[in-house]
Image (spheres, coloured by chain):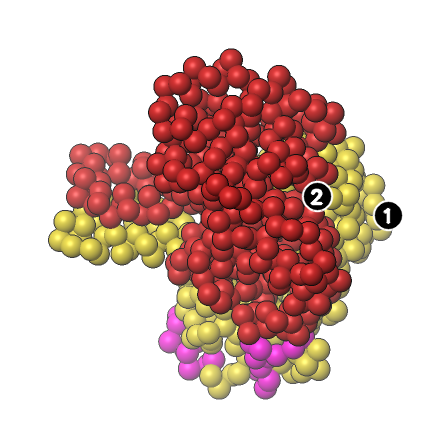
Chain colours: A red, B yellow
């Protein structure tokens, strides 16, 4: 029920997802009266979805504290399904703050993770880059940043399929003496960890688009601002280019002549292709779709969740946290949530 | 002597600057043997410049502590000229950390300013935007952010010529509850200050390129990352567009047809047009040119310094700090450094 065009957009997205993931099982949580007729018209989506009625909806502007009290909201029931082991993950285009708060309280953090983070993929000159944290934690300490690096590494291996992703710590300069104590100490810990061979050291803002490293680790305040600044710059250029090609007959002809290349560039930068911020460090997969996305973007968010479930994202984080010398070893960890006998299960709300 | 192509680039820049500011007096500090023959060939630059020999140079990779010991370096002598009242400001394309450290220690902060900041101008959909701090202070408290807002306001009025610039505080969301305590408290102080009518509240990363406000205030860590992330995104698009237009005969023809519009776009985004980061909050004007810029970029950095000197930037900051209720009133302030009887004076190093 979350996002600007729900539930129709979600169901159209599920129709696309059903084609790519016919083995998935989706628990579709929301207002049954609104969902059922839409789903009836979507043959593929129907074949993978089970509807669960939820009488309430968490609106986009609702405060997390108010959202926590709505125990029969669609987002809450979907998250309950993950917490109860019924689903391996949840995908939602709804209220970000509410989703994060509910996920932290109901699904809970992985043992050894102090604070879950928000991660996403951004385009760069040298391929996709994983960035985290993107806003879950406005203030971070050394342990947080180190744990983000471990999770970013697993994310890049799981979702991007890299074998040894390079990891950079975002800073105001690449020299060792730059930045505040937190980033300098985090760099020291990473240099002494199992991740050391992959740790590139400090990277700067321009290194994100340059693709200097596969993973960029930062606190939630800086990461959120950086991601939105980059998106804003790309949007501005896109709009200005549209004006350039609409000036007169010559520029419109120019557009037609360059269209194949421009279309590929636009597709490559298409925000829908990068839709699906992941809340990593929780006892289940939680993917936040952009609220303003369309069916293609929502289907991509489901792709991300499926990748994480199928490649046992959380099991790998548990293993790696043991290696970095936190207080939790894999033996202490609870059984993985992602195990299913009849294909991966996701809940959408 | 600072920057990749000094001193030739600096002298070529001064030739351009002399055309725009024939009344300026430039104290050119550096290796006289290298400077004199270059200057001799530049008629206009010669007419506004006096050369002062400096035997030493602060290299680009020198630590600020080492730079402080080089008392006869060109950058040091130029800064000494400002501290001694001989020059109203200094423009340098050299080592940023050294320039900042020397300026703070030798020129000193304005009374009432706890920490000087680095400000610069960035392009946006709705005109130029002033951003600060861009890296002088990686950690900032409430007072710092409030003082940055006051200085950003004066900067936008002085250099951009706006009468009542709108001011935004960079945050991870525009709602009042978002962000950490520091930004929330800074917003409260600004809402209660003389700046309140111009204070827009919180802005997010994408608001920079959108031009939501004329001034964007943030801590030096976030500002540095945001600026470089935006620059990196623009550079990536520029490079990719070049590839698009170089694919085949059709795309090359497209480029020729769209060239007037594309050229205007490129000119508008030209980093040289935005060259010249200003260290605000010091007892004199200090402008840092990018080290990799050319003569046009360096001349622009001189334009910025001239604007600040001619429009009495620091006098205005002193007046406004009095209004915001810090411990300093204009009456306590020392006499303005910018007063000159025979035209503004700058030192370049």
Quadrant containing the C terminus of chain B is bottom right
**Tag 1 subunit:** B
Q: Which percent across, then down, holds residue A11?
A: 43, 26
Which residue corresponds to the image point at 34% horizontal and 57% vertical from the top-left? B239
Which residue corresponds to the image point at 31% horizontal and 37% vertical from the top-left? A242
Neighbours of disc 2 within 10 Å: few (<14), some (14-19), many (20+): some
CB within 8 Å, label 2 to label 1: no
Give the magenta range. Answer: B35-64
Q: Quadrant of residue B11?
A: bottom left
Asked whether the viewer can see residue B214, the reply is no
Above/below status of A168 relative to A160? below
Circle 2 SS class? loop
In the image, residue A310 lies in the stretch drawn in magenta: no
> Left or right: where does residue B209 sit relative to residue A324?
left
Check disc 2 and report the residue beneath it.
Answer: A108
Q: Which percent across, then down, holds residue B74?
A: 59, 78
Q: Among all residues in the image, which is located at the extreme front?
A: A341
For residue B327, which numbered disc appears in the image?
1
As measured in the structure, the alpha-carbon distance from the residue carrying label 2 to the one carrying label 1 is 48 Å
Above/below status of A166 relative to B235? below
Which residue corresponds to the image point at 40% horizontal and 28% vertical from the top-left? A47
Q: Quadrant of residue B212?
A: top right
Neighbours of disc 1 within 10 Å: few (<14), some (14-19), many (20+): few
Q: Which percent across, then down, holds residue B197?
A: 69, 29
> Left or right: where does residue B178 sit relative to residue A18?
right
Q: Which percent across, then down, holds residue B178?
A: 69, 37
> Left or right: where does residue A92 sit relative to residue B46?
right
């Amino acid at each position: 029920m979350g996002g600007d065009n729900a539930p129709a957009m979600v169901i159209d997205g599920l129709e696309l997802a059903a084609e790519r993931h016919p083995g998935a099982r989706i628990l579709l949580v929301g207002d049954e009266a609104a969902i059922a007729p839409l789903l009836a018209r979507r043959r593929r989506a129907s074949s993978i979805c089970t509807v669960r009625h939820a009488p309430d909806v968490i609106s986009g502007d609702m405060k997390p504290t108010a959202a926590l009290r709505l125990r029969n909201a669609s987002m809450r029931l979907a998250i309950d399904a993950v917490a109860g082991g019924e689903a391996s993950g949840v995908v939602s285009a709804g209220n970000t703050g509410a989703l994060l708060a509910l996920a932290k309280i109901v699904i809970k953090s992985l043992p050894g993770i102090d604070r879950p983070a928000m991660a996403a993929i951004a385009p760069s000159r040298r391929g996709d880059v994983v960035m985290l944290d993107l806003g879950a934690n406005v203030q971070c300490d050394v342990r947080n940043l180190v744990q983000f690096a471990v999770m970013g590494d697993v994310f890049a291996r799981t979702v991007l399929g890299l074998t040894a992703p390079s990891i950079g710590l975002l800073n105001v300069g690449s020299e060792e003496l730059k930045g505040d104590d937190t980033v300098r100490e985090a760099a020291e810990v990473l240099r002494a960890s199992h991740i050391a061979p992959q740790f590139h050291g400090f990277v700067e803002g321009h290194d994100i688009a340059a693709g200097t490293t596969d993973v960029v680790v930062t606190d939630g305040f800086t990461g959120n601002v950086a991601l939105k600044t980059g998106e804003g710059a790309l949007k501005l250029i896109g709009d200005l280019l549209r004006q350039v090609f609409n000036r007169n007959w010559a520029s419109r002809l120019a557009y037609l002549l360059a269209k194949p290349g421009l279309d590929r560039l636009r597709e490559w930068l298409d925000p829908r292709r990068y839709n699906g911020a992941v809340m990593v460090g929780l006892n289940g997969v939680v993917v936040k779709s952009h609220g303003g996305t369309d069916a293609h973007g929502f289907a991509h968010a489901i792709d991300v969740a499926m990748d994480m479930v199928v490649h046992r994202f959380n099991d790998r984080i548990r293993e790696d946290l043991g290696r970095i010398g936190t207080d939790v070893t894999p033996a202490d960890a609870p059984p993985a949530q992602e195990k299913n006998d009849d294909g991966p299960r996701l809940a959408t709300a």
